[in-house]
């Protein structure tokens, strides 16, 4: 029963993402570059490209995130879907489409069981909620994430959580 609910949630999320993706045109140069990448390395390339472009060109980051999500569906790897959803959420956050990012983050949060995935969703939600001026909720999520990273001595990721917290 849980698998059916998970599949329904993922399917509905895919439909929403496709609805928003209709406006995105993927440049031929990107499509050609992706076709030349080994299938085993394609998702990693797309996710890194989305992260790299996030602060410089939100639209390009979104294109790579959408392609990463499509690749995660093609390869049917659950951990790829998790990462791709977070990439999509962050791309929408950087584009100022906070409601879309919150929707993606909320759906992802309700679907994931792995603690790292849940923490990633909470950090995404904290960032997007901050953009909608829902500071109280943003701070709550940020504090949870900071406590988790402190407990695990994760000095690399705590920086992201502290930056969201500071902005809130």
Image: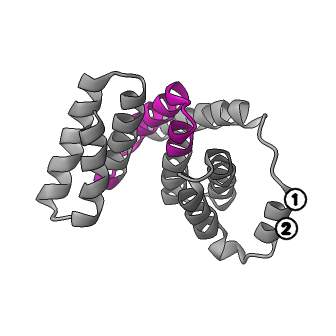
| Placement of 45 over or under 54, stated as above or below | below
- Is residue 56 a member of the stretch shown in magenta? no
Q: Position of residue 120 (x, y in %)?
A: 36, 49
Q: How far apart are the two marked residues, 2 and 1, measured between alpha carbons?
A: 6 Å
> Which image quadrant for residue 37?
bottom right
Q: Position of residue 29 (x, y in %)?
A: 84, 63
Where does the N terminus fall, quadrant-wise? top left
| Placement of 99 over or under 148, stated as above or below | above
Q: Residues within 10 Å of mark 1 (few under 14, many from 20)?
A: few
Answer left or right for 98 relative to 30.
Answer: left
Start and end of the magenta stretch? Answer: 89-116
Instruction: Name the residue located 23 percent from the left edge and 32 percent from the top edge.
Output: 139
Mark 1 lies on residue: 28
- Is residue 106 a member of the stretch shown in magenta? yes
Instruction: Give the mark count.
Output: 2
> Which image quadrant for residue 52?
bottom right
Q: Nearer the viewer, residue 110 or 167?
A: 167
Report helix, strand or loop for mark 2.
Answer: helix
Instruction: Name the residue located 28 percent from the left edge and 65 percent from the top edge.
Output: 156
Q: Nearer the viewer, residue 110 or 68?
A: 68
Q: In the current view of this chain or complex, which residue is farthest to the left? A: 151
**Dominant secondary structure, magenta:** helix
Mark 2 lies on residue: 32
Q: Position of residue 91 (x, y in %)?
A: 56, 44
Q: Are marks 2 and 1 in contact (CB under 8 Å)?
A: yes
Instruction: Name the residue located 23 percent from the left edge and 46 percent from the top edge.
Output: 145
Give the image's coloring scheme.
one colour
């Amino acid at each position: 029963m849980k698998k059916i609910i998970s599949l329904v949630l993922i399917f509905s999320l895919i439909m929403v993402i496709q609805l928003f993706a209709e406006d995105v045109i993927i440049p031929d140069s990107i499509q050609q570059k992706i076709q030349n990448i080994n299938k085993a390395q394609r998702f990693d390339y797309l996710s890194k490209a989305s992260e790299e472009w996030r602060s410089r060109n939100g639209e390009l980051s979104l294109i790579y995130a959408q392609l990463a999500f499509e690749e995660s569906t093609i390869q049917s790897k659950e951990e790829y879907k998790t990462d791709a959803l977070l990439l999509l959420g962050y791309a929408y956050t950087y584009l100022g489409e906070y409601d879309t990012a919150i929707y993606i983050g909320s759906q992802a949060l309700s679907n994931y069981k792995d603690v790292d995935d849940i923490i990633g969703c909470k950090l995404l939600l904290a960032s997007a909620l901050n953009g909608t001026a829902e500071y109280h909720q943003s701070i709550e999520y940020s504090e949870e994430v900071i406590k988790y990273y402190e407990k695990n001595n994760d000095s690399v990721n705590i920086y992201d959580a502290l930056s969201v917290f500071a902005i809130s």
